Image (cartoon, grey):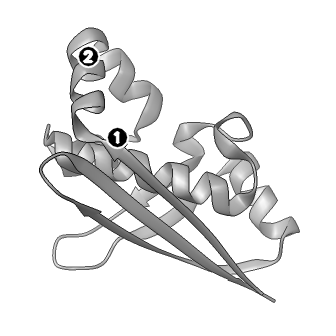
Amino acid sequence: MVLVGTDLIEIDRISKTIENYGQRFLNRIYTEHEINFCNGKVNSLAGRFAAKEAVMKLLGTGVRGVGWKEIEIHRQRGHKPTINLYNKAKNIAIKKKIIDIEISISHSRSTAFAVAVASTK
């Protein structure tokens, strides 16, 4: 079986949230790796936000079922992003027999978009 999740978000929404809540928002939503990798680039942070929501939808939980930091968008420069799941998110993936999650993230000047695709056993 193939599972799919998508999400689209306005970059300005993330920018305004960072302006209002600063590091508190960043620490609530993003892992240390994500914060360091994005280095303050709002379009990259918005892309990761969309990617996390896409994975939540793929898992069938939405934003209330797992914590934001239980889904990590990991990337090394020059390589495609990968997904690391922790705690509840990892347990849900195991129960659903998910063997692989691929993520694609893109953005324009105003929006960020992500699609997550998973295969199951």
The residue most toward the right is 95
Residue 65 image offset from top left, x and y in percent: 74, 40
Q: What residue is shown at x 44% (from left), y 56% (from top)? A: 51
Residue 71 image offset from top left, x and y in percent: 55, 51
Residue 104 image offset from top left, x and y in percent: 38, 72
**Residue that label 2 marks:** 22
Quadrant holding the N terminus:
bottom right
Task: Say which element carries label 2.
Answer: loop
| Distance CA(mark 2)–CA(mark 1) | 15 Å
**Residue that label 1 marks:** 32
Residue 115 image offset from top left, x and y in percent: 47, 68
Q: What residue is shown at x 30% (from left), y 78% (from top)? A: 80
Question: Would residue 41 appear left or right of 66 to someone viewing this image?
Answer: left
Q: What residue is shown at x 80% (from left), y 57% (from top)? A: 91
Q: State whether residue 12 is above or below residue 52.
A: above
Q: State whether residue 112 is above or below residue 35.
A: below
In the foreground, 113 or 24: 113
Q: Amino acid at mark 1?
A: Glu
